Amino acid sequence: MPTSANDTMPSFDRLLVATDFSAASQAACRTAIDTCLALRASLVILHVFRPPEAGDQAPDGLAPDSKALYDRCQASLQELRSQAVQAGVDCEAVLGSGNPTATILETISAKKIDLAIMGTSALHGLERIVFDSTTEAVLRKAPCPVLTVGPHAMSSEKALQSVGPVIFATDFHFTTIHAMRFAACFSQLTASPLHCLHVMPRTLEACTQCQVVPSIMSEALQQLANESGLVVGAPICATTYGCEVSCGVVDYAREQKAKLIVLGVRKASLEASETHLHIAYRIITEAPCPVLTMAFASQPDLAIETVRRKAPAAV
């Protein structure tokens, strides 16, 4: 499995956080400020203003005044910028307009953003498979990694100052393994241990004939880490079991008090409708820490040769 010439250690010099001033966005802003301090990066805070449509009503029952609403948004945006500057972050506030997804993506390109940060709200019951539309679209289309702060994530201060690891969760897909360089970068920049994780089906856990599988998977993970040529130090390679991949990753993150989860995701799977493609969304909404996601264009489905040769039924 050759390493791509493009697999150099990424830099995170300029970050963007998109806010709609909701509780989820406030958590994302706190994470953005702390992340900038940890990475010594500058920050762009973006709010996309959407004028009230006809028939909209304010909480007092009166039709909202567009100019007054615009001024409040401007004031709130400047308050967030002041908080970032007071914390020691070089920060720019941008008040955009139009379609939120398009404006966020345009700003990412125009400002040459290295990492976008967004918040998302809790999902319940059958709604677990329905993800915030703007965040989902940005995850699918952004040219840079997206750091999402889900509803169960611990406070950013505790997450970034914890001694927990950065977890790179992988299914060995050839395309997504390149996300390891982002995990390695955060591991280095935050002086955190790096864990490479693969989740296996719960049905194999009690199978005596499959007891060798975890060691095979760990060997494959170690090979993946070695061949990337980018991992700082020796990563811990772990396999775990779960009825769902998302549950396995989240449970492991809780046990390890993880600082960050890193996922490589195929863009084609994010746009499809099969159940398995919701794994990334479920991890984001259930994770106890922020989740960094990088979407890659699809490539041939090649797994690590060690796994294919020794344990084809486990992949």
Image (tube, helix red, strand yellow):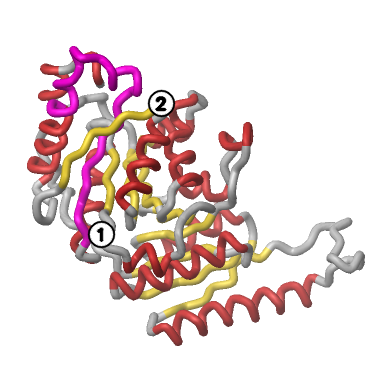
Q: Name the kind of residue labelled 1 in the image.
A: Phe
- In this image, 299 relative to 44: left or right? left
Give neighbour class at mark 1: few <14, some 14-19, many 20+ (Cα, 10 Å).
many
Q: Position of residue 65 (x, y in %)?
A: 83, 72
Q: Residue at x 42, y 73 (%)?
A: 33
Asked if residue 112 shows in the view, the reply is yes
Name the one closer to the observer, 278 or 7: 278
Which tag, 2 or 1, sits closer to the chain's start?
A: 1
Q: Position of residue 71 (x, y in %)?
A: 71, 79
Magenta residue check for 182: no
Q: Position of residue 191 (x, y in %)?
A: 20, 65
Quadrant containing the N terminus in the rendered view: top left
Q: Residue at x 22, y 43 (%)?
A: 196
Asked if residue 111 shows in the view, the reply is no
- The residue most toward the right is 61
Q: Name the kind of residue labelled 2 in the image.
A: Cys
Quadrant containing the C terminus in the rendered view: top left
SS of the residue under disc 1: helix
Q: Which mark is residue 243?
A: 2
Q: Residue at x 70, y 62 (%)?
A: 50
Magenta residue check for 211: yes
Q: Residue at x 22, y 60 (%)?
A: 192
Give neighbour class at mark 2: few <14, some 14-19, many 20+ (Cα, 10 Å).
few
SS of the residue under disc 2: loop
- In this image, 142 relative to 314: left or right? right
Q: Which residues fall within the magenta stretch?
A: 192-216
- In this image, 185 relative to 81: left or right? left
Residue highlighted by disc 1: 186
Q: Position of residue 199 (x, y in %)?
A: 30, 31
Residue 164: image quadrant is bottom left
Q: Which mark is residue 237?
A: none
